[in-house]
Image (tube, rainbow, N blue to C red):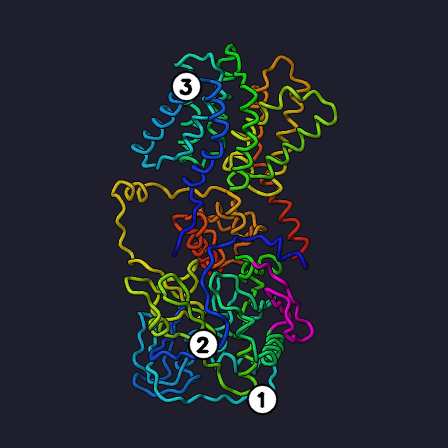
Amino acid sequence: MMFDRFFSAGLRLPAVAMAAPGKCPVVLTEEAAITADRNEELRVEPLVDEEALVAQGQPLLRLRADPTIALVSPMAGRVARIELAPGRRLLRLVLFREGDDRHEYAHAPLDETALRALMQGAGLWRNLRSRPFGRMPASGERPAAIFVMATDTRPGAPDPQLALTGGEDDFAAGLEALQKLTAGQIWLCEGKVSDLPVPVGVRRILCGALHPQGLPGIQIHRHHPARIDAPVWDIHAEDVAGLGSFLATGLVPDTRLVSVTGAGLREPRLLRCQPGADLRGLVHGVLRPGPHRLLSGAALDGQQAHWLAPRDRQVTVLPGATGADHRHWFGAALRRAARPMPVIPTAALEQALGGDIPAHALIRALGSGDPESAIRLGALSLLEEDLALADYVTGAVPRVSGQLRTVLDLIATEEAAP
Amino acid sequence: MTRGLWDREMVALVLLAAVMPMALAWLWYGGSAALVRLLLTLLLSGFWHLVFMLVRAQPPSFAGALTALAVAMLAPPDLSLFQLVLGISFGSVMAELVMGGWGRNVLNPATVTLAFLGFGFPAAPWADLPLPVAWAAIPAALIAMVAGVIPARTVLAATLVGGLAHWAGLPVGPVLPAAGIVLVLLVADPVASASTRLGGWLNGVLYGALMVLFAVQWQLAAPLQMAVSAALLISLVAPLLDEIAIATWLARRKRRHG
């Protein structure tokens, strides 16, 4: 176990300049939004009207399929606009900052049912992610295990242990609460040996220091593979501490630790901001001149966005123009006309999937859209972010992570069919 | 959003760079005859890649040059132009291009070409490569292994088996140079060899074992003939080795996770 870190499979990526982990300023942007995550479909029912003044933590939206689950306001402010696509699918609910009210929930010692109801009503349910498929869990779902991620190896990611500083007791309380949600095991994944207090029954895993060892998918695949009848949840350690403090005070945590990195910045930043913050507000004043792309997430798995995505703790600013592609017409024609370039099995590819998974077999199964082989090789434990490194390393076109999503969606439709 | 290095063409280019020591040593000792032969194979391989690009919109690959180099080095030297053209056309078209290009092939096109030439025209004697080319295979293998473009476990396993056999006193000495050259050029091809961990080890061990068997039992065969035959047989079983590796991996996981 001790030498695990030195022999852990993974890749050394180009270093990303990070801000010194000193004092993290709280930066609340003037605008924030509740958005759906990538590939997430949220059919919602608004609980407030446009122009309404709302408190931080107040429920603003309710899921139509699961009305106990609410999405809450990331900050005190005024509802600017609620944009829904046909079928009442949430596009975004935008808020302007105004006032500093916080919505307080009643909090008493709870049994499982009450805890679930409270978490769902206070928007904390959204911090959980269920595999297979990577959705927010349904209100009645019981996981076979919960992975708490106190490590993150993505380049430029803020150290979760730093986010926990000062909140160790809340973290322990949060873990105890999580234990009520499942009869299964709680796993705590750490990047280094720490003295975090944990309740009895929580198993600690020391993860390797190289990417992708700090991704929940790789750890879940190794220690407790998800199955369709036995979903596995993962949650970020900071959100567990937030759950603990919520149960103690009744206040929904108002900020999260976010690192802003990338070559398009004059200096990297480490700050605390509200969930769903406006990315332009976070990079204001530190951008280099010239065109740039703002990504929510790491450079590997991030996507161009306007708002910080619900699960992201990173903002990446890449220099360079957006989109426009000036390659030669002949090369472009070849690229589009032919079938995609095959991925060659190299040592880099194997390391990009953590070394344990038969990488090339999995990629071939995904490329040929073969759900059975993919399931056999453990695709149910994985999500797009887990294959983002393989995409980066091989430059695969189309992206392997996109192929995984296609296969997962196919499996989900087949499962849903009677 | 950003992209790394190891796309198909980069792998092919690094492989080409890695085999340069062997190619240069071979050209040095082969002289102008070797150069003409290499140009001919390059031209033919390039021609078929061009045909498939124009007809099937299939992007050409630098791996074609790798095939050309391996064929030029290893094919029997006395073949007529027609025989060589026939062999390369068969190998690169049937083993690689009709499958969808490099990366989708099951067998190494150079192996198929050489087997075709060797079995089709048995009267032509096999090449006898100068010893320095075999020595040059060592840096070539090291470069490719460090870059991760050939499976290191396959090379290590085969070397280990060869070394053990030599240590045990079996008469493998004469075939070692040819076995080493073919190991680097044909057997350890990242696409046609086993891609899993256990599969890679088995792949190397099997190749080594076959070479030892041939060296001991196959009288009257040239070392290169033995090595090419072993390479062909091994690349035929490589998918099976991968299946075995995945099956044991699944069994281990089943025992562990239920």
* Residue labelled with disc 1: A108
Q: Residue at x 33, y 69 (%)?
A: A306
Which type of secondary structure does the marked residue at label 1 adopt? loop
Can you give x and y, in whole percent of width and height, for residue A187 in the image?
62, 67
Which type of secondary structure does the marked residue at label 3 adopt? helix
Q: Main secondary structure of the magenta part?
A: loop
* Residue labelled with disc 2: A272
Instruction: Check residue A154 in the rendering and tell me which mark sits there, or answer none.
Output: none
Q: Label 2 lies in what chain?
A: A
Name the amino acid type tagged 3: Arg
Q: Badge 2: how crowded within 10 Å, few (<14), some, or many (20+)?
A: many
Report, in whole angstroms, how far the alpha carbon at label 3 lies from the one at label 1.
85 Å
Asked whether the viewer can see residue A342, the reply is yes
Location of the N terminus of chain B by quadrant is: bottom left
Report, in whole angstroms, how far the alpha carbon at label 2 lies from the one at label 3.
67 Å
Whether the residues at callouts 1 and 2 have beta carbons within 8 Å, the answer is no
Can you give x and y, in whole percent of width and height, for residue A125 in the image?
50, 75
Closer-to-camera residue (A144/B45): B45
- Residue ranking furthest to the right: B168
Report, in whole angstroms, how far the alpha carbon at label 1 lies from the one at label 2.
28 Å
* Residue B94 figure quarter: top left
Depth check, mark 3 against mark 1: the one in front is 3
* Residue labelled with disc 3: B37
Name the amino acid type tagged 1: Ala
Is the residue at mark 1 from the same chain as the one at mark 2?
yes
Q: Is residue A189 above or below residue B198?
A: below
Which type of secondary structure does the marked residue at label 2 adopt? strand
Q: Residue at x 47, y 18 (%)?
A: B30
Q: Residue at x 50, y 88 (%)?
A: A105
Name the amino acid type tagged 2: Arg
* Residue span colored magenta: A182-209
Q: Label 1 lies in what chain?
A: A
